[in-house]
């Protein structure tokens, strides 16, 4: 699979465009008679091709921010623009299209269906795209080859190591050729060797132009990023060195 075929390759010599622009973003939850502010007036730009990590204490708002970036939630106030679409005000159909076409998701739990093969798990991500069967099959083969698992297409999750399962999950995320990959603790269930393998794969995808936004508690993961953010008490600050 060539870089152009993946759909991630950045235009040469072009200034990176703003992919996400958050302005005055607040997210407040109400429960048990009190309000909890997870995000408090966040202003943030993320550019095409960025590799961004987000760190912070448990309960500091990291998962909330990732849900907003993934069009899985809306802010209480402010705007979350992905390109020219404001997630805060877009309709349900538009948000579904964004999730299906624009964003790939990878989680700490691999979220693979145990009764399906690697090929079938990856293929599921293409269901909303309504591609022809031969195109779907070709994309799945290419995605699995891209993560080094071309020879494991017929294996079920129980027949794969933890690192291989996460590679299948990454293949499932990139098979639709998204603009951005959102990862929530993608190495959290892996040992150090497997963690480094997955980090190398993510770095390679970013080098091809895919935008990465990774929530992590692991400083070894965060150090791989070009840009490091810390989210604490609802506020974001850039700690890149």
Image (cartoon, grey):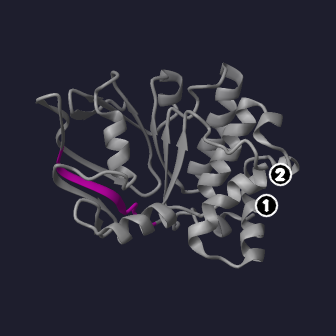
Q: Residue lying furthest front in this view? A: 32
Q: Quadrant of residue 28?
A: top left
Q: Residue at 72% of width from left, 41% of height from top?
A: 114
Q: Residue at 22% of width from left, 50% of height from top?
A: 75
Residue 23 highlighted magenta (yes or no):
yes
Q: What crowding class fits label 2: few (fewer than 14 Cα within 10 Å), some (14-19), or many (20 or more)?
A: some
Above or below, comparing residue 157 to residue 87 in the picture: above
The picture places residue 17, in percent across and down from the top left corner, at 37, 63
Q: Dots 1 and 2: beta carbons under 8 Å? A: yes
The picture places residue 40, in percent across and down from the top left corner, at 16, 38
Q: Residue at 33% of width from left, 56% of height from top?
A: 20
Mark 1 or mark 2, which has the lower sequence index?
1
Q: CA distance from mark 1 to mark 2?
A: 8 Å
Q: Which mark is residue 153?
A: 2
Residue 41 highlighted magenta (yes or no):
no
Q: Which mark is residue 141?
A: 1
Q: Which mark is residue 239?
A: none
Which secondary structure type mostly characterizes the magenta part of the structure?
strand
225 left or right of 111 in image: left
The magenta segment is: 14-26
Q: What crowding class fits label 1: few (fewer than 14 Cα within 10 Å), some (14-19), or many (20 or more)?
A: many
The picture places residue 174, in percent across and down from the top left corner, at 61, 56
């Amino acid at each position: 699979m060539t870089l152009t075929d993946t759909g991630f390759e950045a235009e040469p010599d072009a200034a990176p465009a703003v992919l996400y622009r958050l302005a005055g973003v607040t997210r407040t939850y109400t429960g048990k008679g009190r309000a909890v502010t997870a995000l408090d007036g966040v202003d943030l730009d993320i550019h095409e091709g960025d590799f961004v990590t987000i760190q912070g204490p448990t309960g500091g708002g990291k998962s909330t921010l990732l849900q907003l970036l993934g069009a899985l939630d809306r802010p209480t106030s402010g705007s979350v623009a992905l390109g020219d679409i404001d997630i805060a005000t877009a309709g349900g159909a538009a948000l579904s299209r964004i999730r299906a076409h624009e964003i790939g998701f990878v989680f700490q739990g691999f979220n693979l269906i145990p009764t399906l093969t690697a090929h079938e798990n990856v293929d599921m991500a293409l269901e909303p795209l309504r591609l022809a069967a031969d195109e779907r099959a070709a994309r799945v083969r290419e995605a699995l080859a891209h993560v080094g698992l071309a020879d494991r297409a017929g294996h079920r999750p129980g027949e794969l190591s933890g690192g291989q399962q996460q590679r299948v999950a990454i293949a499932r995320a990139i098979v639709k050729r998204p603009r951005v990959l959102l990862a929530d603790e993608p190495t959290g269930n892996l040992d150090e060797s497997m963690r480094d393998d997955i980090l190398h794969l993510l770095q390679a995808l970013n080098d091809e132009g895919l935008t990465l936004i990774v929530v992590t508690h692991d400083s070894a993961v965060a150090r791989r990023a070009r840009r490091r953010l810390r989210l604490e008490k609802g506020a974001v600050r850039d700690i890149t060195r």
